[in-house]
Amino acid sequence: MNRRTLGKRIREERLRIGLTQEQLAECVDVSTTYIGFIERGERSVTLEKLVLLAQCFRVSVDSLLCDPGSDETAEEPDQRLLALWQSASPEEKRLICSICDTVINKRYR
């Protein structure tokens, strides 16, 4: 994955959770200007900052690195579910379990 594609994914995730560049910069302890450079693909992201970005977005690092349009990087449902589970908060995990219980129990009615 190139810097431009990664920057686009980071911008998409930032917008998905409704953060401004300023808020994201504060979350990962960098300048707003640096976030702009990253999103435009003009600067590289260190592994440390990539991990912080993933934590801020509540996604896995590999989900940021994977190109969703590429068949090569498409996750199997089990892998996607595991990545979501690992990035979920305890409250979100309880909600996921509740949803799964509802889906499974409805299937057997």
Image (cartoon, rainbow, N blue to C red):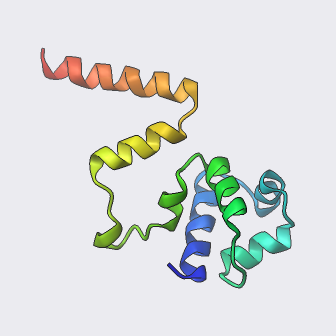
- Rendered view: 68 above or below 53: below
Q: Image check: 109 left or right of 95?
A: left
Q: Residue furthest left?
A: 109
Residue 29 x %, y %: 84, 57
- Rendered view: 34 above or below 18: below
- Rendered view: 63 above or below 82: below
Picture quadrant where residue 67 is located: bottom left
The residue sitting at 81% across, 73% down in the picture is 34
- Rendered view: 14 above or below 100: below
Q: Residue furthest front?
A: 47
The residue sitting at 67% across, 56% down in the picture is 53
The residue sitting at 37% across, 48% down in the picture is 80
The residue sitting at 29% across, 20% down in the picture is 102
Tally of numbered tags:
0
Given residues 46 and 54, the one toward you in this image is 46
Residue 12 x %, y %: 57, 64
Q: Quadrant of the C terminus?
A: top left
